[in-house]
Amino acid sequence: MMDVVQLNDLFFEAAETDRRLPPAIRKQKLTAWPEYPVDWHGYGWTQQGETLTKATAEQISRFDLALQYCLQMPLEDRRLVWAIAHSAAYRYRGAQWTKIGRLMGFKDKRIVKRKYEEALVKLYYKLKNDFPNAPK
């Protein structure tokens, strides 16, 4: 059985894994003229930063587990947990509490943090009551 901190880590890892998965809808390749620099100093101007590697089988299994746990939560808690997990994905500073608070209609980032912690604690106790003999 996972504790609250492990549930938090599971959802954060699931958000990162979600970004590593291929898109659900493939974009069509259309014919177009590419933009190009006009002078020779423009070499490498289209190179982007680091690219993400594909998700491993273990990461996808934990992603599925996070989705199963997510279905145990009410819709409002589910939206909040995924919004925070996705805002924290690949960020050194963590979740964007203030931005999520504005998007969800909360006035203070402390309210968002408290509701997030409450959602994880409620999920912990729901899983603990539903699966009392789960391996630890």
Image: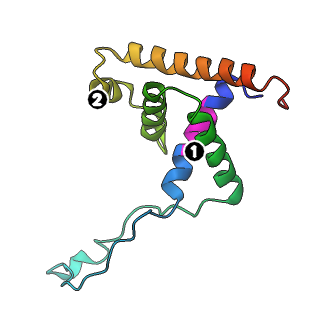
Q: Is residue 128 above or below residue 29?
A: above
Instruction: Determine the secondary structure under disc 1.
Output: helix
- Measuring from the top left, give residue 83's x and y in whole percent: 42, 35
What residue did someone put label 2 on? 103
Q: Is residue 57 above or below residue 103?
A: below
Name the residue rendered at 41%, 19% in the picture. 112
Instruction: Determine the secondary structure under disc 2.
Output: helix
Q: Quadrant of the N terminus?
A: top right
Q: Find the magenta span and give its range.
A: 8-14
Name the residue rendered at 56%, 35% in the picture. 71
The main secondary structure of the magenta stretch is helix
The crowding category of the residue bearing disc 1, from other C-alpha atoms within 10 Å (few below 14, some 14 to 19, many at least 20), is many
What residue did someone put label 1 on? 14
Question: Does residue 19 show up magenta in the picture?
Answer: no
- The amino acid type found where label 1 is placed reads Ala
Which of 33/66 is in front?
66
